[in-house]
Image (cartoon, rainbow, N blue to C red):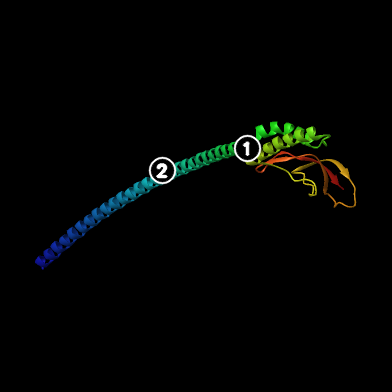
Amino acid sequence: MKQDINKQADKKEFEDEITNETSENTQFVDEEAENVVEQTEERVENVQSEEREEDSKIKQLEAKLEEAENRYLRLYADFENSRRRARQELEASEKYKSQTLITELLPAIDNFERALAIEPENEQSKALLNGVEMVYRSIIDALKKAGAEQIDAVGKQFDPNYHQAVMQTSEEQFESNEIVEEFQKGYILKDRVIRPSMVKVNQ
């Protein structure tokens, strides 16, 4: 009987030891698991923090890149505008290079036309006027070669872009706004008016 009691006591003691050891092992495992979880969370937080920093750096670089692209586009646009203006100025200079000379010749041409409007009184005057007309025609031909032409006026509709009305009349045989007389010829160089025609316009 006493022997059975001792066996039961030994068994109870062994079970208690097993229970204590199991409890200690479980506690150790729990502590290790907590440490692993904490370390994992810390690593995840570090990784997330690094990702946020990288995202911030990427955004900053993207902003700088966008700013640089915009600055480049502005500079390129300015360069293109400057080059286009320079080309246009060069083309205009070449296109209208004879304008100054033609403008200075107009008063002389006007005098030729006034002289040709005079009726010759004798053969000598007629011969003189023929010579004047030859010179006048030569000058007009030279102007045409340079791109300058006289503006049509009499019989045309008045156009303020090409004509300057200095007188008005009211005559039934003419249409309204029709040019009935020209006092001074106008000239155009290519597509630029050098001098408008001075005209009389029917109301």
Residue at (21% x, 57% y) in the render: 20
* Closer to the eye: label 1 or 2: 1
- Mark number, residue 96: 1
Instruction: For mark 2, give the secondary structure.
Output: helix
Q: Nearer the viewer, residue 68 or 116?
A: 116
Among the 4 quarters of the image, the one containing residue 22? bottom left
The answer to whether 33 appears left or right of 106 in the picture is: left
Which residue is denoted by mark 2 in the rendering? 57
Residue at (16% x, 60% y) in the render: 13
Residue 111: percent from left, percent from top:
76, 32
Q: What's the residue type where badge 1 is placed?
A: Tyr
Callout 2 crowding tier (Cα within 10 Å): few <14, some 14–19, many ≥20: few
Q: What's the residue type where badge 2 is placed?
A: Lys
> Image height check: is 128 above or below 18?
above
The answer to whether 77 appears left or right of 35 in the picture is: right
Instruction: For mark 1, give the secondary structure.
Output: loop
Q: Nearer the viewer, residue 2 or 144?
A: 144
CA–CA distance in space, label 1 to label 2: 58 Å
Residue 178: percent from left, percent from top:
82, 49
Q: Are marks 1 and 2 in contact (CB under 8 Å)?
A: no
Q: Quadrant of the N terminus?
A: bottom left
